[in-house]
Amino acid sequence: MVASGVLVLTFAVLGAFVRVPYVALGPGPTYDTLGDVDGTEVVSVDGTRTYDTDGELRMTTVSLNDNMTLFGALGMWLSGRYALAPREEYFLPGQSDEEVRQENLRQFRSSQSNAEVAALRRLGYPVQAVVEQVVEGSPAADVLQPGDRIVRIDGKDVTDSAGVRKVLAGTRPGQTVPVTFHRDGEPERTESVTLTRHPGGSHGFIGIQPTDRADVPFDVDVALEDVGGPSAGLIFALAIMDELTPGAMTDGRSIAGTGTIDAEGNVGEIGGISFKLVAAHEAGAEAFLVPEGNCGEAVVTAPEGLRLVRVATLDDAVNAVESLAKGRPVPSCAG
């Protein structure tokens, strides 16, 4: 009996205090991007005319619980709302919680930027090519810096990041090309850059990562703190479009969704779709915009009564939301 008691006590101490190398994933909070959080608009547009919106475009999240005890992990798993996964799948060896948080925030800001560009491009606004990163030691390292707007390369005008890549694809290593760019607070200028060989091909390499930025005389802002990752891009883009176009896109309906988005408006699949579906259903959403690549999992795990709408592009999403508002058929994950 004494030995058994010691074993039980040891197990109790271990279960209550020893941390396990797992994280628990579950439904996270949702946010109406057409509404506000603590009195602050989630998506706001300043400096141009905006229009009244109605209903909800609700972004969804996944909660991640770390530093759990054995009993805590078992309790979450037994609840049926959470799944356990090895911690190493979400935290690199030696990576701190703060480093993970900073990377998630970087992805979140990038998704905001892509959403803004995709939405405004679809509405007919121009975009411009901007330097996002400069490779250390590359030909551009002593010439360009993040934030510079690329105007012309080798005498050819460029208006977006695709244009930058297209021009550079026609160059060769050792070629010296003039690069015209504009830096905030300074006049436009041109500098010559001698290209090296591209690591992934035989054409010239300048050493920049270009990105697209909307060229508009107004500001778009997303006011959400402590939310990370890239998966809210699609919903942000829809909210921006709804505010900048007459008429309420949702016609009073509550629609949720998820999906990454690039500057061209292509929607990418995400992780944790099953938890996001639960969160949306509990928040009262009647339909969920599902990235095409997530449809298989969504059909299997969706709560009863939640309509799954398949989307692959921003155009698909806009057409689906407008069709839902008017009671028309929409593409379904179920086929």
Image: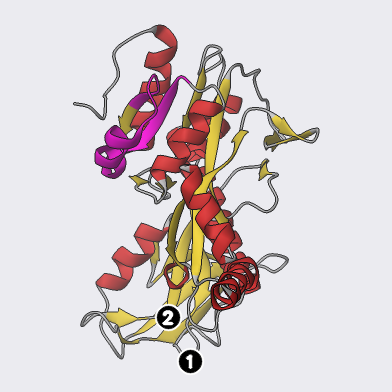
Relative to 231, 225 lies left or right: right
- Is 321 in front, or is 284? 284
User: Label 2 neighbourhood size at 10 Å, few (<14), some (14-19), many (20+)?
Assistant: many
Image coordinates for residue 26, horizontal then vertical, percent = 50, 47
Q: Residue at x 79, y 36 (%)?
A: 38
As drawn, is 322 to the left or to the right of 200?
Answer: right
Percent x, y of residue 150:
50, 65
Label number found at residue 250: none
Upstream in sequence: badge 2 or badge 1: 1
Does any portion of residue 124 appear in the rendered image?
Answer: no
Q: Left or right: 51 with respect to 160? A: right
The C terminus - image quarter:
top left
Q: Quadrant of residue 208?
A: bottom left
Residue 175 shows up from this direction:
yes
Residue 237: percent from the left, percent from the top? Answer: 50, 37
163 or 198, nearer to the observer: 198
Instruction: Determine which residue is flagged by label 1.
Output: 137
Q: Which residues are magenta?
A: 286-308
Q: Residue at x 33, y 36 (%)?
A: 301
Q: Which residue is mark 2?
A: 207
Question: Which quadrant of the figure contains the N terminus?
Answer: bottom right
For the residues labelled 2 and 1, the Cα–Cα distance comes to: 8 Å
- The vertical placement of 109 against 325, above or below, is below
Which of the two residues, 197 or 239, is positioned nearer the viewer here? 239
Amino acid type of disc 1? Gly
- Report if the CB atoms under discs 2 and 1 are less than 8 Å apart: yes
